[in-house]
Image (tube, rainbow, N blue to C red):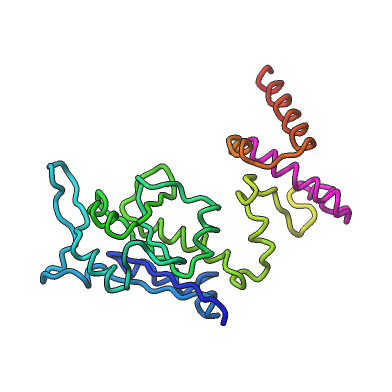
Amino acid sequence: MTRRMRIEIVTLFPGYFDSIVKQSIVGKGIENRLFDIRIIDLRDFATDRHRTTDDTPYGGGGGMVLKAEPMFSCLKSLGFEKPSREGERIVLTSAAGGAFTQEKAVEFSLLDRLTIICGHYLGVDERILSLFGIEEVSIGDYVMTGGEAAAAVMIDAVTRLIPGVLGNFESALADSHVEKLLGAPVYTKPEEFMGLKVPGPLLSGNHRLIEQFRRRESIRKTFLNRPELLDEAELDKDDLDFINELKKENAERADR
């Protein structure tokens, strides 16, 4: 029997995900039964008539904190215990979390079940994280008003790695960041536009030349836009020689 991943999103704003689960690659993946997504309204687990899910923090200060009781009831209703069962993971979108990287997306895509809690306000009562072994994950060094956008980013990055979701899985294997390099520039028809031509190697039909051109342009883009990634990339002698050329060109440009 083919494994079908289950994704659950715990949120205060379930309507946020209406278009996400119906359109584009994610919607097609659900339609083709490659994975399931369930949207869970945290307010359904509040116990008062106002459906309260947050309260003021102990110790004072501004902001609000997501309450422990509704979150506990929600996760228990989903059958979670601590520690999580093999193949299952609960994550919380949080500015205080570890970085969401391509490696993390691959790791999550191999799970049987991924549950994402959309963080809000100052965060979730810390006791919930302890009770369920929840992993905090951040999509970047900035703060947003809620975790729904972060959850949407994770869903997109994770589900596209599930076999069958992309029409051509090679495109996922060649993604930027897979090899710690940014993607090379890409071109399509027409061959010339506004006086700008497609680089000759791409028109040559020589696969070795094309591969070399794309590799070098990928390194060039990484060098210019995200040079820190080169420290982690797997580079051979030709790559390193090319990087030295780029450094020399850069130094000469700075001296002008």
| Residue positioned most to the bottom | 1
What range is drawn magenta here? 195-224
Of the 4 image quadrants, the one containing the C terminus is top right
Classified by dominant secondary structure, the portion drawn in magenta counts as: helix
Residue 28 x, y percent position in the rendering: 54, 75
Q: Nearer the viewer, residue 172 or 77?
A: 77
Q: Is residue 62 above or below residue 28?
A: above
| Residue positioned most to the top | 255
Q: Nearer the viewer, residue 228 or 104?
A: 104
Seen at 80% across and 50% down, the residue is 211
Q: Nearer the viewer, residue 5 or 176?
A: 5
Instruction: Check if residue 174 falls in the magenta segment.
Output: no
Q: Is residue 132 above or below residue 228?
A: below
Q: Nearer the viewer, residue 31 or 65?
A: 65
Residue 29 x, y percent position in the rendering: 54, 74
Name the side, left or right, on which 255 lies relative to 33: right
Seen at 76% across and 34% down, the residue is 242
Seen at 52% across and 64% down, the residue is 109
Of the 4 image quadrants, the one containing the N terminus is bottom right
Residue 186 x, y percent position in the rendering: 71, 53
